[in-house]
DNA sequence: TCCGCTTTTATACATCTGTTTAAAAATATG
DNA sequence: CATATTTTTAAACAGATGTATAAAAGCGGA
């Protein structure tokens, strides 16, 4: 057991440095020695606290998975109480996105840094890492798919799956390559602007989702 | 100079093996010895033909960049001649996607394998690799953004940039994680089905784009 | 203070990395 | 065939990697 007040500053420092480096350059490309150096700690100290490089990754996941999912479900509960189906859909999508995107200042509580790390990890094929990633968020994702279906009863479920897949791809790619937005927009837009990113991903996804539902209203606002 | 008819089978074999391995596991995670082994060739032979690990990556890029861009512009030319703006938008998006997605059987001519490799590379932060990736496709992307603007004159350019960014993110994530579609859909959909993927990405993106055009922005998106 | 436990350190390990070298083999050319 | 060039090979290089080990240091409670 780790005694409170004991000299365990190293553990937190390693955890923070590892998360930062992993989120910047991925899992395989960062060495334990680099993490140790960044945390001003000996290499052996890393394996002492976390057993493995994979153990370190596990610890990072354990730190964030629960809070992010909890916050997501909390926001989802609020969203479900929105009466207007169209606004409800927006609220549901925001409930999914915001906790994954929001402030990374706190070590715990999730945030963009951790999500960026997950984006990089999902790209690396590392089979051992995949075991850790595996379905840490899938059940929550399914809950959201169900919530989306409640907003769009006529849309086929498979296509909702595709759309939410695109949402995640948009999120990940924006976290991985934000400067591409600045480049292609000639500076008119900023890819690091998280609020704008969330808003536009939500708008794009809800438009895509609504396009799935066979036109309910025969007359009315036709695009 | 490489004489035609010379025993340069090794070069092609290395190129193919490298592209396959890079597209499966990324750049940093694949070693030259692994590539050499897969191509039944000596390690020195790889550096003889390609100088570097980076030279190898350059060669793969040179093999695909031009054909893909040529095919894209060819299809774009056809798309621009579509009269109906809505159908034209769809054709423009397809012109962008199809060459990046289509058959990977031929070594040259581009395809999903090469695009998957690019998706992985864009995730790895490798600065040397970034130099090679840099803007091999950005000018083509700008051409497409202009073509989209012609279909949607009222949409602000920055938001078109964002939307095409999401399109690329959706494409990449689908190529990286196709099995997630199968998992979340409980087998009702197949993430490896390229035609469906193209169709749905096009539908989602055009819906998102069209949502930009008519209504004015409700300012200030607060929770 | 001394003791027992936790944490940190230095060091060593085998293995793998990208790259280079010089010799051997294969091929083309006269 | 003999020669010149291209291509392939085996071997070695220095450095980095993840991990293990044993000694040292730090610390809380008696």
Image (cartoon, coloured by chain):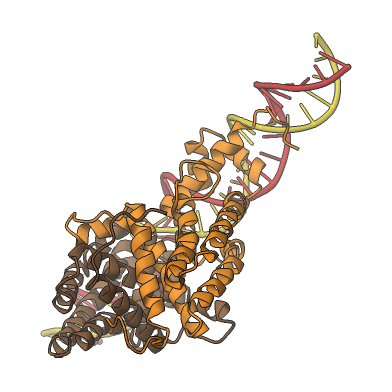
Chain colours: A orange, B brown, C yellow, D red
Q: Name the foreground residue: A212 vs A159.
A: A212
The answer to whether A148 is drawn above or below residue A46 in the figure is below
Residue B215 pos. (x, y %): 24, 70
Residue B46 pos. (x, y %): 35, 69
Asked whether, in this view, residue B37 is left or right of residue A204, the answer is: right
Tell me what residue is drawn at x 25 percent, y 81 percent: B93
Image quadrant of residue A4?
top right
Residue B172 pos. (x, y %): 38, 72
Q: Name the foreground residue: A13 vs A44.
A: A13
Q: Is residue A28 visible?
A: no
Q: Is residue B157 visible?
A: yes
Image quadrant of residue A127?
bottom right
Tell me what residue is drawn at x 54 percent, y 69 percent: A144
Residue B116 pos. (x, y %): 38, 74
Q: Name the foreground residue: C22 vs B148.
A: B148
The answer to whether D26 is drawn above or below residue B10 in the figure is above
The answer to whether B193 is drawn above or below residue D29 in the figure is below
Looking at the figure, which quarter contains the N terminus of chain B? bottom left
């Amino acid at each position: 057991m780790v005694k409170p007040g004991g000299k365990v500053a190293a553990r937190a420092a390693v955890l923070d440095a590892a998360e930062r480096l992993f989120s910047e350059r991925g899992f395989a490309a960062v060495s334990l020695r680099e993490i140790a150096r960044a945390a001003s700690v000996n290499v052996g100290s890393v394996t002492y606290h976390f057993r493995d490089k994979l153990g370190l990754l596990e610890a990072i996941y354990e730190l964030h998975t629960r809070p992010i999912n909890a916050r997501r479900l909390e926001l989802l509960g609020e969203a479900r109480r929105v009466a207007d189906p169209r606004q409800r859909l927006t609220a549901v999508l925001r409930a999914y996105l915001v906790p994954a995107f929001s402030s990374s200042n706190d070590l715990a509580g999730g945030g963009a840094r951790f999500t960026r790390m997950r984006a990089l990890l999902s790209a690396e094929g590392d089979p051992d890492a995949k075991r850790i990633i595996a379905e840490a968020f899938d059940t929550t994702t399914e809950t959201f798919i169900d919530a989306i279906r409640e907003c769009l009863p006529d849309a086929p479920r498979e296509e909702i799956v595709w759309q939410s897949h695109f949402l995640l791809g948009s999120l990940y790619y924006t976290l991985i390559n934000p400067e591409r937005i600045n480049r292609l927009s000639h500076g008119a837009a900023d890819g690091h602007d998280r609020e704008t990113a969330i808003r536009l991903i939500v708008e794009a996804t809800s438009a895509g989702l609504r396009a799935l539902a066979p036109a309910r209203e025969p007359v009315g606002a036709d695009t």
